[in-house]
Amino acid sequence: MLELLKTHFGYDAFLPMQEEVIGAVMAGQDCFVLMPTGGGKSLCYQLPAMALPGLTLVVSPLIALMKDQVDALEANGLPAAFINSTQTPDELRRVVRRIRSGEIKLLYVAPERVIEPMFADFLQTLDVSLVAIDEAHCVSEWGHEFRPAYRELANLRRVCPASPVIALTATATERVRADILSQLGLRQPGTYISSFNRPNLTYSVIPKENDLSGLLSVLGRHRGESAIIYCGSRKATEDMAQALSERGFVAEAYHAGLEAEDRRKIQDRFIRDQTPIVAATIAFGMGINKPDVRLVVHHDLPKSIESYYQETGRAGRDGLPSECVLYFSYGGKSRQEFFINQIEDDAERERARERLDQVISLCSLSSCRRKFVLEYLGEAWADQDCAGCDNCLQPREKYDATEIVQKVLSAVIRTGERFGAAHVIGVLRGSRGERILKQGHDQLSVYGIAASHSQNELRDLVEDLKREGFVSVGEGEYPTLAVTPRGREFLKNRETLMLSRRVAREERADTKGRRIRGDDGAYDAGLYNELAALRRAIADQRGIPAFMIFGNRTLQDMARKMPRTPAEFSRVSGVGRAKLEDLGEPFLDCINSYAKEHGMPETGSGDSRKSGNDRRAAEPSARADGHSYHETGRIISGGVSLEEAAATRGLSPQTILGHIERLVESGIPVEWAHLLPHLQRRAAIETVLEILSDNPLRPVFEELGGEYSYDEIRLVRLARRYPPQQGSRSSEEGERPDPRSMMGRRG
């Protein structure tokens, strides 16, 4: 298994628990596997698939991602295929022939397909060695992404009685786990539960204000990196995307109201790094298999802790530092309560209320948020300081809360202990709300006595008083506040009360953006950027996401070890045999050219830290504005061609073009208009780009009949997104080609 692991995936050792699970699968045992996102669940069935004699059937709800999953497996030398509703009859027949011939080892299907009688008959003609049920929490109605078709998967036992079943998920409470085991009918399963903790993620909850300034600051820390902003409604996603676009960010809205083709294009642009920011509803969910999302924002409240964990889990799947920000306001709670009250089923309505209460508790915490989430999911967490959430990272201070607490408790009593927190706070702040005026509460002595405090401050204080036992909350649809005997004793005795609060934002250290460094050591930032540009160029030409070429951690390891030979390159983490043969040459050329340019030894030691050169340590988000990029910009601005700049720098033209793209996207001045094709050629490329969209490039290249180079297409695409300050150098004038005449060249 270790040999297969290195050959196909390029890793020398298993992640925690993988080896035990794989051993159980190979022994024919049913398994239930709970591992956090990024923990290596997929490998637990993908690797056995290569050693088992027959077919591994993978049941997955991710129809939108099946092609990407299969492409990634084939890039690692694993023969895989999918069957879903997007295929034509001819495509389906070709896949079936490959399956029957034994060529395919992994077959991905949706649960709705599996339960069809015709497909069940087809399975019974095959040698199915293993059944893997991914995202198994979808089987439980107690879970947050219930799929009815999953409830019928137990029928696979009848169809494939001898095949072991492995059920995998990243999110499941104890109740959901028990439901999964029961519904799927697993036979004496081995149960493997890993820690839910994602140490590379930093969590924070921020009071939600009316303006975008706070969010813009957060996005500014991640400019050029991938981010998802979850919003509570379709309109909110559109408003958010528009507001960000007006402020210079590249952002798009995604929700279920869009046409399927539009959703697919937005998703593709995000996965392929064309659109860094997507403002989305939860419709932008499990279909996102992108490892390098650096930021997940909840601009509105998530529906449950499970949803929050699942959605934040889309950040940092590559294990590199990433940030999760939740904006909280009690107005958001009221909106959620309104929708919950529309639920007709009493039991479901009560479950929804319980889930919302847990989310509010998370937002109101003054202690470790990571500890709260992990313990909710059933994992004991002894540490009180995780060093990775705002409450643990940001200092708190004790303050004398006696006076403001007296005001709040008095307001609860004066309004008759018949109203909720929102009404009491409105009275304290001097609101002219209709209900307050109708009740005559604007005539009370407590009316307006806390006008200097914000609504969020008072809300937080009410939550503190609940925890301290000074107020209680009545049961029912509209919970009311009442002062407890302890609270009345406090008022009677005029006690002093000290509470804690965060240090004011402007007074505390800026720790929200803190990055958790890994143990791998420093790497050369300049080389990393060169490798990233090469990766992007190859991915564009092949029409696949950049991470399918190599992940960020693999590029960092290259920039750390700086291999110079194929043997050394094979020792880079994430480089297997298939990728060594396919990609070794261009990446080694890039590394050796960079080493030569910077006067490094001609033969590599296998670790750049031993070279004696000044290593430039880089954070994982190393930007493309280092010395090497600026040098390219200076040369290109002198009016030379790509080829001349490449010869001057000892790099490939594609790498030089990658530098230009990074410089332009980062807003760094560079004069590059002279590189664009002549007007007529440019117009032809633009026409096809408009029809086929900007990405991937391979269909554009093919539609143009191979008469235009990838470099020309990349330059025109860049100009469409970031028009150069100077005009094209084209000396030819020509009419813009008719789009209809451009189509159909492939056939």
Image (cartoon, grey):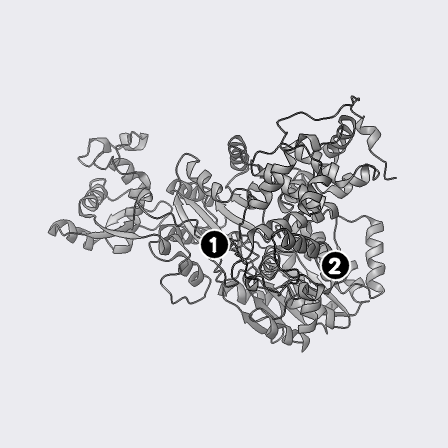
Q: Residue furthest left?
A: 493
Q: Position of residue 743 (x, y in %)?
A: 82, 33
Residue bearing the label numbered 1:
347
| Residue 42 image-quadrant placement | bottom right
Q: Nearer the viewer, residue 691 or 526?
A: 526
Q: For mark 2, give the secondary structure.
A: helix
| Residue 427 image-quadrant placement | top left
**Residue 665 shown left or right of residue 84 in the figure:** left
Q: Residue at x 67, y 56 (%)?
A: 592
Q: Nearer the viewer, mark 2 or mark 1?
A: 2
Within 10 Å of disc 2 (Cα), the crowding (few <14, some 14-19, many 20+) is some
Query: Can you tell which mark lies on residue 187?
Result: none
Q: Quadrant of the N terminus?
A: bottom right
Q: Position of residue 75 (x, y in %)?
A: 73, 58
Q: Position of residue 733 (x, y in %)?
A: 78, 21
Q: Residue furthest bottom?
A: 27
Q: How many marks?
A: 2
Residue bearing the label numbered 2:
74
Precedes in sequence: disc 2 or disc 1:
2
Q: Amino acid at mark 1?
A: Ala
Q: Amino acid at mark 2?
A: Glu
